[in-house]
Amino acid sequence: MMNIKEVTLMTGITASTLRYYETEGLLPFVKRDDNGKRLYDQEDLEWVHFVTALRLTGMPIVQIQKYVRLFHEGDETIAERKKMMLEHKGEIEKKISELYRNLDKINYKLALYDVLEAQINNTDIKI
């Protein structure tokens, strides 16, 4: 078992964020010791990493809460949870595609600057 400080050191997530995630129902299994201090086990740590991945990829908290509720309902919700993940995956892939298109535009502009600098400095462009 780990305390909240150990989890923050392992994950880089602040204690206030961990407490917030728990309050919002995103970390469903965090236990407490006799003094009321949070105790995290490996399963909790996996949930922390999973929730963090969902948040960093843009999933709203409301959607994560829905996922956790479905998880608690058991195996009969596997298809619905899978559908949620597939939809989120599609949104991520769309964002990645947009980022690559925009990166191409930036790279094109940088190549133009290389040409302009070479012309100004009267030097050859090295490829």
Image (cartoon, grey):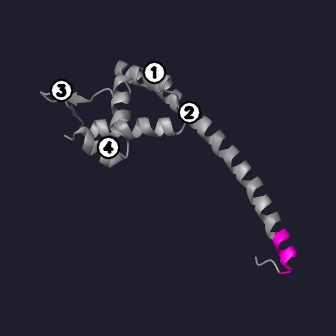
Residue nearer the viewer, 116 or 62 = 116
Q: Is residue 119 magenta?
A: yes
> Mark 3 highlights which residue?
36
Q: Is residue 45 magenta?
A: no
> Secondary structure beneath disc 1?
helix
> Secondary structure beneath disc 4?
helix
| Badge 1 amino acid | Lys
Q: CA distance from mark 1 to mark 3?
A: 27 Å
| Badge 2 amino acid | His
Q: Earlier in the sequence, mark 4 or mark 3?
A: 4
**In the image: residue 22, left or right of residue 39:** right
**In the image: residue 75, left or right of residue 116:** left
**Which residue does the image show at 58% across and 31% down from the upper left?**
87
Place of residue 34 in the rendered image (x, y in percent of width and height, measured from the top left): 12, 27
Q: Earlier in the sequence, mark 1 or mark 3?
A: 3
**Which residue does the image show at 71% across and 53% down from the upper left?**
103
**Which residue does the image show at 53% across and 39% down from the upper left?**
57
> Within 10 Å of the Cα at label 1, are there few (<14), some (14-19), or many (20+) other Cα atoms?
some
Place of residue 105 in the rendered image (x, y in percent of width and height, measured from the top left): 77, 53
Q: Earlier in the sequence, mark 4 or mark 2?
A: 4
Range shown magenta: 115-123
The dot on residue 66 is 1
Residue extending farthest left:
34
Query: Are the two marked residues, 3 and 2, in contact with CB atoms closer than 8 angstroms?
Result: no
> Mark 2 highlights which residue?
88
Residue extending farthest bottom:
123
